[in-house]
Image (tube, coloured by chain):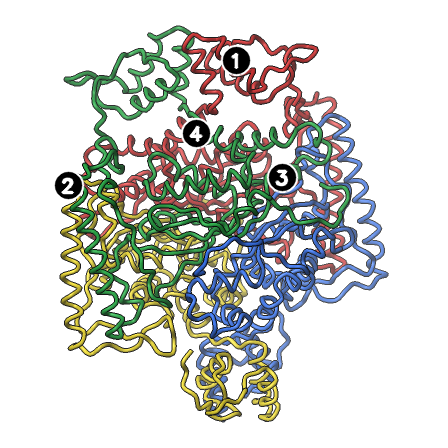
Chain colours: A red, B blue, C yellow, D green
Amino acid sequence: MEKELEKLVRVRVEALDAILGVPFKVLDDGFVRVMDYMGSDASVVQAARVSYGAGTRKIHEDRGLLRYLMRHHHTTPFEMCEIKFHVRVPMDAWRQWIRHRTASVNEYSTRYSVAIDAAQRTHASGWRKQASGNRQGSEGFLDPEKGAPLSAREESLHDLCRSIYEERLQAGVAREQARKDLPLSTYTEAYWKIDLHNLLHFLALRMNDRAQEEIRAYACVIGEAIVSRWCPLTWEAFKDYRLGSLQFSRLEAEVLSALNRGSPEEAFRLARESGWLEEGPEGFKRNRERQEFEEKLEILRIPPPWGKSGLPDDS
Amino acid sequence: MEKELEKLVRVRVEALDAILGVPFKVLDDGFVRVMDYMGSDASVVQAARVSYGAGTRKIHEDRGLLRYLMRHHHTTPFEMCEIKFHVRVPMDAWRQWIRHRTASVNEYSTRYSVAIDAAQRTHASGWRKQASGNRQGSEGFLDPEKGAPLSAREESLHDLCRSIYEERLQAGVAREQARKDLPLSTYTEAYWKIDLHNLLHFLALRMNDRAQEEIRAYACVIGEAIVSRWCPLTWEAFKDYRLGSLQFSRLEAEVLSALNRGSPEEAFRLARESGWLEEGPEGFKRNRERQEFEEKLEILRIPPPWGKSGLPDDS
Amino acid sequence: MEKELEKLVRVRVEALDAILGVPFKVLDDGFVRVMDYMGSDASVVQAARVSYGAGTRKIHEDRGLLRYLMRHHHTTPFEMCEIKFHVRVPMDAWRQWIRHRTASVNEYSTRYSVAIDAAQRTHASGWRKQASGNRQGSEGFLDPEKGAPLSAREESLHDLCRSIYEERLQAGVAREQARKDLPLSTYTEAYWKIDLHNLLHFLALRMNDRAQEEIRAYACVIGEAIVSRWCPLTWEAFKDYRLGSLQFSRLEAEVLSALNRGSPEEAFRLARESGWLEEGPEGFKRNRERQEFEEKLEILRIPPPWGKSGLPDDS
Amino acid sequence: MEKELEKLVRVRVEALDAILGVPFKVLDDGFVRVMDYMGSDASVVQAARVSYGAGTRKIHEDRGLLRYLMRHHHTTPFEMCEIKFHVRVPMDAWRQWIRHRTASVNEYSTRYSVAIDAAQRTHASGWRKQASGNRQGSEGFLDPEKGAPLSAREESLHDLCRSIYEERLQAGVAREQARKDLPLSTYTEAYWKIDLHNLLHFLALRMNDRAQEEIRAYACVIGEAIVSRWCPLTWEAFKDYRLGSLQFSRLEAEVLSALNRGSPEEAFRLARESGWLEEGPEGFKRNRERQEFEEKLEILRIPPPWGKSGLPDDS
């Protein structure tokens, strides 16, 4: 711990002060802006050093220590930083957002006030197609010619929903009930406050390819435009050890090891014993674990010892 | 702690086993059903007694101990019980429900699967009027003659939203995007798991008059039909010490004390010094703290020493 | 929400900046100091107003709104403020402190570093007697003449523990194991970060008479010297509605109401039916609920309709 | 979701029922025993399938789905299982245990009751040496001849601490204060309740080599003797994807990829540019990231392209 307990000046981060309150636009009518924050990269380091005592101060420099913490999942020091956002986001994306339980939230209330008069619009070229290989995702876009009538229908639906909402208010219906048929695309606003550790967890999940495009757009802005300014060393370590990392299961590591020892037969044997190589009429049967391993091998530019799997991925 | 560590049989509650899996209907098409649980009133008592050691076992009987815990906000023993529900609820009410962060949740995914084809309908006599005295609430109902056209409009809006949703799916739009204009009244389903302490906190907030009617309907079923069967002694104590309790602030207690000592002048003086009794053109000015105190006095059947406040409540 | 989204300057509280880093002494060798913070009374108000929309801004003034939030347990806006402390505290008190799970913590590690060479000493006049009426508490002090030999024994025990600890380190024993016989009174240090809502909950429990004196000393300093400077309006409301409040159960409210209606017989009947007035050889039998009610009546200066209970409290 | 909502029978796991209440011994006088539980592997699967809807039921079989969830960090379904333990553990290990904030806890209170009369003893051959390469760990044991006097000293210290504790109680000192100089090795007992997801997180950290031996002993028993019986498919997946997994950072993956493409020069260049290969007087300077990567290469049986680093690890 510190040897001298002196009066302090509050930690500040100039690069973040420079954008405090400034909205970053997201989607057609949404935004994220930083309202307040506490701490910096230095606060993470300081918290970690409570554990080390004063003596080790010389050995590690800050960047190395931060990277060590990130690499080894020593997560508590990252909780020492806190940030508060003001966000404007479609309710449909907010439904996913609010699933992160470790944040503090105050949302705009449509019981107290009239609902925000804006809903997320999709342009003719913005309609995404259902993914074939991933039941929960999307891939590619509809032809804008096919999209145009969908967008037109959407616009008139938004108008109708709003006019029905207003009819109800006019008739004296309570706001809390009048809102019940607003579309999920209606924008809401909220203050959202979270510590850096839990924010990084949010970003790891929501910047991921598997996240839905709308919330990913918010996550990318928060990560790349905000966290990168606030805690640049933490952000760098996060990209190296979380976003860009590759993880191998026990079996995958054994197969990889066999390949690296020049024993493709051993690799083949391990894979077969694990049920990765059952044969079907058109080559190996679909096996998710094998396919995911093949994707990692491709990143490492290692050909699988069992050749191409020969089957389309239709999970 | 227990002196003998013997093999145990798992605690069960017959009255809850008898309704396991059985749906209790809520609203027009929703339900709550218990899927699983752990513990009972006896588990709360057992946990509390860890703190007391064996010696005090004779002194308190279970009911008294449970009541003591509830009265003094000794909340951790109530965390030793856990319950898991399967609920079907309009997304609009679910938006409030999910704000309780201390539960575990798995919700039906409209990214993986087609959205549930049901939305909460409001009958002609079910349209609530905006409350005048409480900006966030409702009071009374619209005349069914005024409600009928609103219900008709709603029905056609629901049909339109659904057919637009299906058009999009037909056109190949990803489920995650096609759903964006479903109305908030669309039903969703989820597993919701929570411990008894946090469940009681949920019930205290959501069985309250100020809660929105829809979520209050669920909370009342959970409390009165389920918790009452599961942990009857806890439920009784909860009703006595939470739902039915009256709380007085420091100032309110002082005013009450003055009244009981037969010093209405002292009570009047305290109230005036606290700014409760500023005069306006038509009697005392509106003052929320005074009005809330008057409501409590009315429960106690004590007339306020300053007479009727004479002003409508228009908060 | 704000109508104009403009660049902001970070909220600061001068009265707190003035003591940032300054240690407040607690016990013989402990302290609390503020390391960092985020937000102020104004941040609570701002968060609450997200729910009201811009239009209500004129109606409530800040103080009234804050008091309303506190009175009605609208707790989420208070989560928008965050504070980080550096504390030095005996491990025995820390064991209680760390039970509050909603904080972020980094504690000095005696695996990495040699344990802090200080233990809490008790002076001859500081030995507290076991409470008779409250199994978990203390009341009054031992005669210093009886305390003096206890203090002398303690001092030599502390010295012995430390020299055994150092012997082990000298012999090459790992720090993580050498520490195992340090006394619970050994000081530790930590960073402790928590939001304002959860801090107030901590203070309500730990400033209470029933809290152990050591942790109460820390809680009082945090409340009276720090929160009072940081968020003075919140602190005032907390004292009025939490620390100084009186709560009556459903039954207690009914009895109180009967007394106020001038029906002591009705009050008597209610009490008897609830089992408060069972007679023993020397008056009413001990009954905790009745005794706690009598204590509240005494605060209100109302004599109980059943006379003095006549029995010592020996819970 | 289920198509038919029928009466259910509560899920049970015979293999766990068979050991309910039975203490598993840990350390010299500690234990872990299961008191209660809720759910099974099947509950995890059921929760995951809420997201998939009925249609996908045929595609995945349970084991495959569980493994998929574990591999892709879909953690919420694992929260649907809950377990409650009764543990007896030295306070020193409990200090680490209690840092896991996502559990419910009721600990034996030494304010209410006399402290447990047992402290963890270390035998002559049980004294561990300070690790040289890891500031926080231990490695190997002291010679029992050197350990014997330490054990003898410990025994007399334990006896002295206890007799001082009892002296204080005899003198009338409150239990809450008398205990202040008990050694950290004193045993305590608690109920500890946690969901399966958070339990696995606890196990991943506390079964790890870097965890202190005492708490690791408890974690291993919980994992290997209890979770393996309770949720065997989850346990298998946990061992494959958590305990036995290898993670590579972005840079490490790039170096590995270069090696696999047969470009050791490229691997060397990447490593040098990242500062891994700074030269000192006796070979490469110590670099933690490089050394950790070399350890992973060794597991894969791949020699580093820059030869042996030639320096002892003295972090």
Q: In terms of secondary structure, where does tag 3 sit?
A: helix
Q: In terms of secondary structure, where does tag 4 sit?
A: helix
Using the numbered discs, state the Cα–Cα distance from disc 2 to disc 4 in whole angstroms.
42 Å
Residue C171's mark? Answer: 2
- Which residue is rendered at x = 45% and y = 60% of the image? B2
Q: Quadrant of residue D1?
A: top right
Q: Amino acid at mark 3?
A: Ala
Mark 3: few, some, or many residues within 10 Å (few <14, many ≥20)? some
Q: Which corner quadrant holds the C terminus of chain C?
A: bottom left
Q: Quadrant of residue B287?
A: bottom right
- Which residue is rendered at x = 38% and y = 68% of the image? D112
Which mark lies nearer to you, 4 or 3?
A: 3
Residue C185 left/right relative to D77:
left
Q: Chain of mark 3?
A: D
Discs 3 and 1 share one subunit: no
Q: In terms of secondary structure, where does tag 1 sit?
A: helix
Which mark lies nearer to you, 2 or 4?
A: 2
Q: Quadrant of residue B118?
A: top right
Proximity of marks 3 and 1: CB atoms separated by less than 8 Å? no
Q: Which residue is mark 1?
A: A269
